[in-house]
Amino acid sequence: MSTDEGARAPDAAQGPDPAPLLRVEDLRVDYRTAGGRAPAVRGVSLTLEAGSKLGVAGESGCGKSTVALALLRLLPKSARVGGSVLLDGEDVTAMRWGRLRAVRWAGASIVFQGAMHALNAVRRVGDQIAEPMLLHGTAPPGGTQARVAELLESVGLPRWRARSYPHELSGGQRQRVMIAMALACEPRLIIADEPTTALDVMVQAQILRLIDELVAGSGIGLLMISHDLSVLADTCDRLAVMYAGRVVEEGPAAEVVAAARHPYAAALSAAFPRVGDPASRMAPRGLPGDPPDPAALPEGCSFRPRCAVAEARCSSTDPDLWAAGDGGRRAACVKVLEEAV
Amino acid sequence: MTRSATAAAAPPEEPGAPGPGAAPGGPSRAVRILRYLGGRLLTAAVSLLAVMVTSFFLFRVLPGDPVRAMTEGREVSVEQLEELRRQFGLDKPLWQQFADYCLGILRFDFGTSYQYRVPVAELIAERIGPTVLLAGTGTLVAALLGLVLGTRAAWRRGSAGDRATTAVALTLWSVPSFWLGLLLIVVLASGAGWLPGLFPTSGMSTPGVQGGFDSAVDVAHHMVLPVATMVAVVYAQYLLIMRSSVLDEMGADYLTTARAKGLRDALVLRRHAVPNALLPTVTLIFLNLGRVMGGVILIETVFAWPGLGSLFYSGLRVPDLPLVQALFVLFASAVIIMNLLADLVYPLLDPRVRT
């Protein structure tokens, strides 16, 4: 980071730290539905430093994919977004369309769940990888085709695969193409939205290792979103667990998985038995019930109806994220507050 | 688990796979293509055969005696009627007539028209150009109009523009073509009130106009109203199909990918949504191309267009058996051939069908 970084207006007020790569503050997303507005994301704040890896975990419907799409303003028109998304100090939510299009993919790219339908079925994968380079003018002097071949080889695919169509590839190969595509413009941030879902376990491990290798030492920030806590724990430095549109626990990945402070995070990590841990294998636990309907959230703590340790006061207070230990651990549970005092 | 162990345990996944085009264990690409072609051709041939047989019996089931119809209003003796029947071969038993018909077709001889007294093939050759010109132009314009408007309507789904476009198209679709044609003739060709007659009322050319360019302009001028009538009545089906198939694609993940890459909406639509949405529409266009040949009968009749449609109409009134049989086979073959073409073109557009 150069020295003029500190001179930027937003940082001057926040002290000597250079602006983080990504700072999401109080992100709120409502969807317009037949029965009024349904809040999908209710005040999420996240910070990601350049070169680090943040995981966002949670069940389907907890708002984690909505967060991913909101970062580049890719949500449908029925969504209303509040709060701010600072990418390298610049607020994405306030950008003009032209600037936003320039930032998309070149500044931050997304690895979608490529195993399914994220690739266009009637265009060759090489053309799809080349498309953002041609659009943003980032093709190297050596030529776009050479760069496509290089990208394919960097994700472990032979260069002739550029001429293939998506249906000619396996799920894992398609996911590799998706990753090559995300790297095409050398973005500062990669958002991986369920990058290994729908892949079998062996391929999943390969893809995770690939992402890990490509991101390591490159200074690229990685925001990885998954419902699978074990996937995130292996890959990410820090972890944020979401429930009903909020972050309920945050901290260093290993600690959150090993000793979660929030009952929901604890239940989520118990649902994925750890390899080599007989205790968790003997006692795998699920979580009864379903996540709440965003249009009809319960009073008080939104996790209370499914919580095994809920008390009377949980139905009246909806706790914020409280400091819950070293390493910047935070959790949103009244019990954490009690222990800290 | 170590790296090498993981890599070794995932055999068919990545590199070292065979080159493109080689499908391990299956027949080669050329064989598969030939097999596909052969299958389609065989299906087409069987359909064509069925059409020929149907054509022969269909018009003999229809009421009406050609010999009586042709001599109507004239005094003829029973002997003369018998003589005519003998000339046309109608005195032979049905199975023999059928055999003659089949043998004729094998020699591309469809017989001689009862009423025009010339070989049917000659009549058709004379009239097929105008019909192909009219039906082809009409379908092309209608398809383009429908595709463009349908795509725009879908992209702005639910907007006032979408609703207006769809409503207008549906209204025109429900209008009978002969009525619309007559209306256009009254308003734009005959002249109404202060409106002068802008277009010719009928026919395909003005007698006396000579020269390549002049006569081309003259034919185009004559074509405006019949083509407009045809387009107005049929473009709705292209519009509706394209609209719904673009709508099907709208929620697709690959469009989110395209937007995330920073593409403008117009490019997302043109490069990604439309090529996918076109697939189901193309088949329909080809099927219609075949169908309109026989479908322009009403329009040709209203505008006195010298095509196959009006020929068919005049043949039906008698019934001029050799003529209507041949035209029926021709109209049906057009559908079969276009269907075959659709099968052949589709793989060029959709890579998933190619392999």
Image: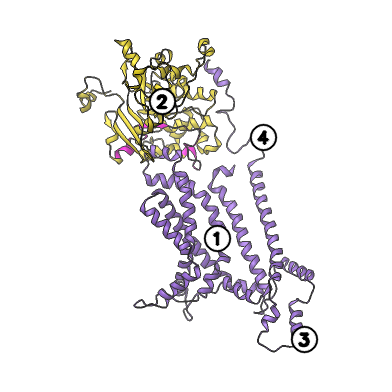
| Chain containing the residue with disc 2 | A
Q: Quadrant of the C terminus of chain B?
A: top right
Which numbered marker is on residue B79?
A: 3
| Chain containing the residue with disc 3 | B
Residue, disc 2: A224
N-terminal label among 1 and 3: 3
Residue, disc 4: B25
Q: Is residue A120 magenta?
A: yes
Disc 1 residue type (three-letter): Leu
Give the distance between the C-alpha atoms of the residues marked 1 and 4, in whole angstroms: 40 Å
Give the distance between the C-alpha atoms of the residues marked 2 and 1, in whole angstroms: 51 Å
Tag 2: Cα neighbours inside 10 Å, few (<14), some, or many (≥20)? many
- Element at label 4: loop
Tell me whether marks 1 and 3 sit on the same chain.
yes
Residue, disc 1: B289
In the rendered image, what is the letter of the chain coloured yellow? A
Tag 1: Cα neighbours inside 10 Å, few (<14), some, or many (≥20)? many
Tell me whether marks 4 and 3 sit on the same chain.
yes
Point out the frontmost of discs 4 and 2.
2
| Residue A219 seen in the figure | no
| Chain containing the residue with disc 4 | B
Residue A22 to residue A252: above or below: below
Q: Drawn colour of chain B?
A: purple
Point out the frontmost of discs 4 and 3.
3
In this view, the residue in front, A136 or B280, is B280
Place residue B24 in its image quadrant. Answer: top right
The magenta region covers: A98-126
Point out the frontmost of discs 1 and 4.
1
Q: Residue furthest bottom?
A: B75
